[in-house]
């Protein structure tokens, strides 16, 4: 019997398995990027952005699960989300969603006018201009898949908030990645690296300088660094360091994004703008 040739293997989890498990597909990621920028998004950049978003949402869900377990509950509620963020400042992402969701009203504060009357919250805009809040529903399927993979269930309000956080976070990630490409490197945003109290400063997150365009190494393999018109994987990694201020979550997000995109960044061809 003729056997199919085996796929190349590498140490650690299979890249294909990592990608198949991602709840946020490249098509969704690229749709979000199109709302933000007209730049081309490379395949490896789309996978990296999906991976980072998955890592952030997984950590939020894990924190909410621990909060629910303390009350002997399995179904997650918005209160568990607040508890997770309160216990871990790294999880405070997607802040633009906070003004939209009733869950975060207590965190953002209640506004009063000069006479001490509560100012009503802003009404939802019906603008045709795409936004992270308007497009949050696109993430529901991915959020539910991620919840199932973590063995968790959530009330609809919790799913809504996870949708919104994912949408806003990925939109902000897209904006920062586009800015990195336009400005020629993350150095534009400063070199300070915030860290958690008592932790050593993390090592440099990129092996290659961000300013350089995509080039071939001596073995003929392509390094995905963008070309001034394309958002590459390393631009996503740079944007991740802007969105996640430091600590374990940022390092894990960067590591998992590199693992998820290893095969696309070492393929024996250039990344085509039509890809």
Image (tube, grey):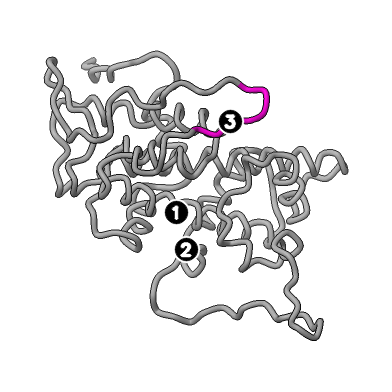
Tell me the distance, in whole angstroms, between the alpha carbons under discs 3 and 1.
21 Å
Are the residues tagged 1 and 2 within 8 Å (C-beta)? yes
Q: Nearer the viewer, residue 38 or 32?
A: 38
Image position of 46 (left or right of 158): left
Residue 250 location (% of width, % of height):
52, 33
Residue name at image x 58 percent, y 51 percent: 144
Q: Quadrant of residue 258?
A: top left
Residue 168 location (% of width, % of height):
50, 57
Task: Classify mark 1: helix, strand or loop.
Answer: helix
Image position of 229 (left or right of 125): left
Are the residues tagged 3 and 1 within 8 Å (C-beta)? no
* Residue under pointer 1: 172
Q: Earlier in the sequence, mark 3 or mark 2?
A: 2
Residue interval drawn in magenta: 193-199
Mark 1 nearby-residue class (10 Å; few <14, some 14–19, many ≥20): many
Image position of 41 (left or right of 98): left
Tell me the distance, in whole angstroms, between the alpha carbons under discs 1 and 2.
9 Å
Residue name at image x 31 percent, y 37 percent: 233
* Residue under pointer 2: 132
Q: Nearer the viewer, residue 178 or 223?
A: 178
Are the residues tagged 3 and 2 within 8 Å (C-beta)? no
Residue, far right: 71
> Which circle marks residue 195 in the picture?
3
In reply to whether residue 196 is colored magenta, the answer given is yes
Residue name at image x 44 percent, y 54 percent: 172
Residue 81 location (% of width, % of height):
71, 50
């Amino acid at each position: 019997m003729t056997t199919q040739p085996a796929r190349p293997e590498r140490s650690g989890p299979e890249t294909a398995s990592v990608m198949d498990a991602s709840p946020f597909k490249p098509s969704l990621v690229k749709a979000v990027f199109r709302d933000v920028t007209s730049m081309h998004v490379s395949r490896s950049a789309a996978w990296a952005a999906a991976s980072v978003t998955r890592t952030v949402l997984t950590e939020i869900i894990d924190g909410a699960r621990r909060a629910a377990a303390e009350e002997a509950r399995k179904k997650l509620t918005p209160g568990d989300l607040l508890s997770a963020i309160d216990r871990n400042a790294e999880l405070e992402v997607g802040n633009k969603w906070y003004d939209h969701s009733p869950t975060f009203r207590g965190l953002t504060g209640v506004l009063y006018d000069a006479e001490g009357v509560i100012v009503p919250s802003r009404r939802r805009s019906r603008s045709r201009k795409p936004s992270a809040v308007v497009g949050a529903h696109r993430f529901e399927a991915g959020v539910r898949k991620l919840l199932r993979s973590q063995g968790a269930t959530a009330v609809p309000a919790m799913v809504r908030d996870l949708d919104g956080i994912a949408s806003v976070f990925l939109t902000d990630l897209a904006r920062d990645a586009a800015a990195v490409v336009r400005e020629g490197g993350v150095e534009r945003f400063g070199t300070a690296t915030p860290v958690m109290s008592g932790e050593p400063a993390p090592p440099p997150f990129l092996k290659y300088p961000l300013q350089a365009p995509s080039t071939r190494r001596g073995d003929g393999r392509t390094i995905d660094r963008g070309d001034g018109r394309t958002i590459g994987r390393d631009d996503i990694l740079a944007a991740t360091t802007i969105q996640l201020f430091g600590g374990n979550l940022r390092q894990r997000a960067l590591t998992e994004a590199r693992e998820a995109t290893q095969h696309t960044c070492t393929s024996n061809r250039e990344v085509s703008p039509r890809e």
